[in-house]
Image (cartoon, rainbow, N blue to C red):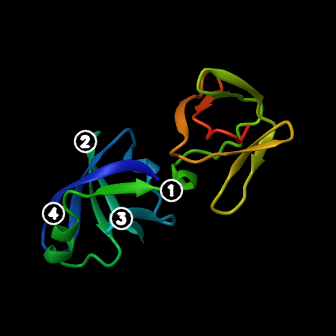
Amino acid sequence: MLPAAKILKSNGTEGDILIGLLDFDASDFKTEEPVFIEFDGLPVPFFIESITPKGTSRAIVHLTDTDSLADAEELVGRQILLDAEYDGEEEDDFTGWTLYDGARLVGTIDGLEDIPGNPCLIVGDVLVPLHEDLVQSIDRDARIIVLSVPEGLL
C-alpha cells in the first residue's frame, strides 16, 4: 500500500472530505479503482464518487458510504492508501532491472512471477519475494531496485 493522501478535515455536511495530496495529483485517483483507509490495522476499500482539485496539493473528495458529517469526521486524520497495482502508473515487471540485496549485486531481473499475495522477482532460477517491507529503494531512472532479502533466500 502506498500513502497517497491525508484526510485533513470534513467539508460540508454531506460526507465530503478535504485531503492533502502526498506526491500524487488528483488525476491519479480513478473512480473505478478502490482507495484504502486503515481501520484497526486493516485496509478498508472505498471508491471515490467525486474528486475536485483545490490547487495543486489538495482536493475535495466524496467517498462511497460517507454520506454525513459524522461519517466524514470519523475519517479525519487517516491516510488514503493506494494498492501498489492501483498507483496511477503502469505496472512494471522490472524485467531488465538490476537487483541488489543491500550493497550486494544479485543480478538482472528476468521478470515478475505474480503469485497472488506474494509477487516474486525472477533472477535466473531464483524467486525473490517483492514485498514493500523488503524494499529499501527503487531508482526508476537507473532501473535499480534494492531489497533487504531475508538470510537464506538467495
Q: Which residue is identified by label 4?
A: 11
Q: Nearer the viewer, residue 46 or 97?
A: 97
Mark nearest the camera among 3 and 2 is 3
Quadrant in which the C terminus appears: top right
* Contact between labelled residues 4 and 2, with CB atoms less than 8 Å apart: no
**Dot 4 alpha-carbon crowd within 10 angstroms: few under 14, some 14 to 19, many 20 or more:** some
Query: Tag 3, which secondary structure?
Result: loop
Answer with mark 3 or mark 4, whichever residue precedes in sequence.
4
* Contact between labelled residues 1 and 4, with CB atoms less than 8 Å apart: no
Residue 30 left/right relative to 121: left
Q: Which mark is residue 83?
A: 1
Q: Residue at x 63, y 61 (%)?
A: 117
Answer with mark 3 or mark 2, whichever residue precedes in sequence.
3
Q: Which residue is identified by label 3?
A: 41
Q: Is residue 47 above or below residue 79?
A: below
Q: Which mark is residue 55?
A: 2
